[in-house]
Amino acid sequence: MKSIHQGSCHCGKVRFELQADINQATECNCSLCLRVGALWHGTPDSKLRILSGEEELEVYQFHTMTAMHYFCRHCGVHPFSRPRIDPRIWVVNLRCVHEIDLSSVRVSLFDGRNWESAAKALLETR
Ligand SMILES: [Zn+2]
């Protein structure tokens, strides 16, 4: 039984619920994630529920136009994305999840700046 976590963007229009045991996150150094500063937690599609504000979300795409980076059109915060490595899953920005202790989360680096080789290495370890 996984815990249910609540999260939101900054202004609170976008609210979501994540069903996960959160002990791990990925920091990506691609040109976007570097600027956003997100800590991403990958989760299957069925474990993220958008509770409100779906209509307030905008999508930002760049380069291969595969990943879908959602952000709130009011406050600009990026709560979750569909990652390029597998756009069927979600990656949730743990900085938008309420009441979790980020210091207890193990952070691994994804070298998104060299996406092709980083993705190949990651898929080989699975
Ligand atoms: Zn917002």
Image (spheres, grey):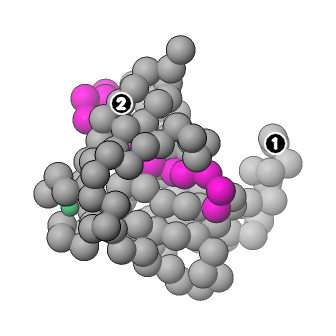
- Is 91 in the magenta? yes
Label 2: how many residues lie within 10 Å, few (<14), some (14-19) or many (20+)? some
Label 1: how many residues lie within 10 Å, few (<14), some (14-19) or many (20+)? few
Q: Earlier in the sequence, mark 2 or mark 1?
A: 2
Residue 17: image quadrant is: top left
CA gap between label 2 and label 1 equals 28 Å
- Residue 91 seen anywhere in this rendered image of the structure: yes
Question: What residue did someone put label 1 on?
Answer: 125
Specify whether 74 is left or right of 46.
left
Q: Amino acid at mark 2?
A: His
Q: Residue furthest bottom?
A: 63
- Is 33 in the magenta? no
Question: What residue sits 55% from the left and 61% below the top?
Answer: 82
Question: What residue did someone put label 2 on?
Answer: 5
Q: Are marks 2 and 1 in contact (CB under 8 Å)?
A: no
Question: Which of the two discs, 2 and 1, sits closer to the camera?
Answer: 2
- Residue 10 seen anywhere in this rendered image of the structure: no
User: Which quadrant of the picture is home to ligand 1?
Assistant: bottom left
Question: What residue sits 47% from the left and 30% below the top?
Answer: 19
Q: Amino acid at mark 1?
A: Thr
- Return the x and y of residue 63 as percentages of the image width and height: 59, 85
Specify the segment rendered in magenta: 87-101
- Secondary structure found at label 2: strand
- Return the x and y of residue 14 as percentages of the image width and height: 26, 55
